[in-house]
Amino acid sequence: MSDWTSLWYVWLILLTVFLLLLCGVSASCIKFCCRKKRLPVETFPRHPCDLTAIGIDSDSTAHSTVT
């Protein structure tokens, strides 16, 4: 069985994983803590909509072509 201190590449991998984890946690904290509260901005302005409803009889040709 090898001595853990002689396996330098294992320590290098562990150090790399630890640094990546530390960077991720730091970035998340900075994003969460330092973000300013902004008013919600609508991406699209609201426009009034027109809705037209057409009644169709069962005898209508439009109804028979739709069904």
Image (tube, grey):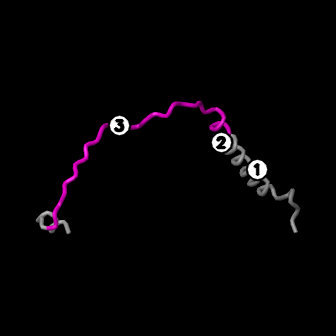
Q: Nearer the viewer, residue 38 or 59?
A: 59
Magenta residues span: 29-58
Q: Residue at x 62, y 37 (%)?
A: 31
Residue 67 placement, left or right of 43? left
Q: Residue at x 64, y 38 (%)?
A: 32
Identify the secondary structure beneath mark 3: loop
Q: Nearer the viewer, mark 2 or mark 1?
A: 2
- Find disc 3 in the rendering and name its residue: 46
Of label 1 and label 3, which has the lower sequence position? Answer: 1
**In the rendered image of this protein, does residue 8 appear above or below residue 45?**
below
Tell me which amino acid carries mark 3: Arg
Q: Nearer the viewer, mark 1 or mark 3?
A: 3
- Find disc 1 in the rendering and name its residue: 15
**In the rendered image of this protein, does residue 32 appear above or below residue 9?**
above
Of label 3 and label 2, which has the lower sequence position? Answer: 2
Local crowd at mark 3 within 10 Å, few (<14), some, or many (≥20)?
Answer: few
Identify the secondary structure beneath mark 1: helix
Q: Nearer the viewer, residue 7 or 56?
A: 56
- Find disc 2 in the rendering and name its residue: 28
Which quadrant does the C terminus fall into? bottom left
Q: Residue at x 87, y 56 (%)?
A: 5
Q: Nearer the viewer, mark 3 or mark 2?
A: 3
Question: In the figure, residue 9 lies in which quadrant?
Answer: bottom right
